[in-house]
Image: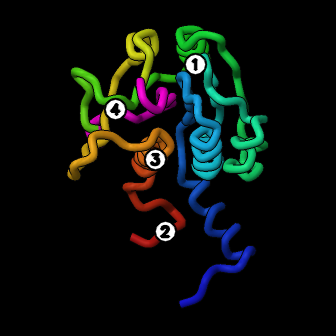
């Protein structure tokens, strides 16, 4: 076994893009740390997120530390800036997305049981405080990531990566035309 070369890697990614349906967006609600935002943007570009709403005090993609972590992936994303999270929630809904918050909250369902079909906008919050009340209230559903260890929560960039992957994984459960059964 050997690592794929650039041509084979492009072919592999093209095959997966063909079997992926549904639009995915992100809403970053006061995600203040530039390194977290950069990591989220890099994952978002890798999993073909269409739009990113930056709300409140979310670090800007042009911030030096954000750019350092994003490694240029921001050029593959469309950004919208909202002063308040509720403005971003309204804009994402107007763009046709169903909003699913990722938060440890009352009435949240495990991520693997959440309705992630169709056009989904995942809403993630501040590193310490989580989602604002306005974002929580604006979500159609709230999901959490079940954890087995003694740590109570995940880093926001890690949680976002897991949630984005779960949204995309759902489209890949059934074998597609390019993959063997």
Label 3 sits on residue: 158
Label 1 sits on residue: 92
**Labelled disc at residue 179:** 2
Q: Say whether disc 3 or disc 1 marks the residue closer to the N-terminus.
A: 1
Horizontal and vertical percent position of residue 112: 29, 43
Task: Tell me which segment is drawn in magenta.
Answer: 111-129
Horizontal and vertical percent position of residue 27: 55, 26
Question: What is the distance, in whole Å, between disc 4 and disc 3 at their CAs?
Answer: 20 Å
Q: Residue at x 72, y 48 (%)?
A: 73
Image position of 136 with respect to 8: above or below: above
Question: What is the distance, in whole Å, between disc 4 and disc 2 at their CAs?
Answer: 25 Å
Q: Would you say the residues marked 1 and 2 are in contact, meaning their CB atoms lie under 8 Å apart?
A: no
Q: Would you say the residues marked 2 and 3 are in contact, meaning their CB atoms lie under 8 Å apart?
A: no
Q: Nearer the viewer, mark 4 or mark 1?
A: 1
Report crowding for label 2: few under 14, some 14 to 19, many 20 or more residues within 10 A (C-alpha).
Answer: few
Report crowding for label 4: few under 14, some 14 to 19, many 20 or more residues within 10 A (C-alpha).
Answer: some
Q: Nearer the viewer, mark 3 or mark 1?
A: 3
């Amino acid at each position: 076994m050997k690592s794929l070369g650039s041509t084979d890697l492009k072919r592999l990614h093209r095959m997966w893009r063909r079997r992926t349906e549904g639009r995915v967006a992100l809403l970053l609600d006061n995600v203040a740390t530039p390194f977290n935002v950069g990591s989220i943007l890099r994952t978002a570009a890798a999993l073909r997120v269409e739009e990113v709403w930056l709300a409140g005090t979310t670090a800007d993609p042009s911030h030096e530390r954000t750019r350092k972590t994003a490694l240029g992936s921001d050029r593959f994303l469309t950004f919208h800036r909202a002063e308040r999270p509720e403005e971003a929630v309204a804009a994402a809904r107007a763009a046709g997305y169903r909003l699913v918050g990722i938060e440890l909250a009352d009435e949240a369902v495990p991520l693997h049981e959440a309705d992630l079909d169709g056009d989904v906008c995942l809403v993630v919050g501040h590193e310490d405080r989580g989602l604002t009340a306005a974002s929580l209230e604006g979500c159609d559903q709230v999901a959490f990531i079940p954890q087995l260890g003694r740590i109570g929560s995940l880093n926001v960039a890690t949680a976002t990566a897991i949630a984005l992957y779960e949204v995309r994984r759902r489209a890949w459960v059934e074998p597609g035309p390019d993959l063997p059964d």
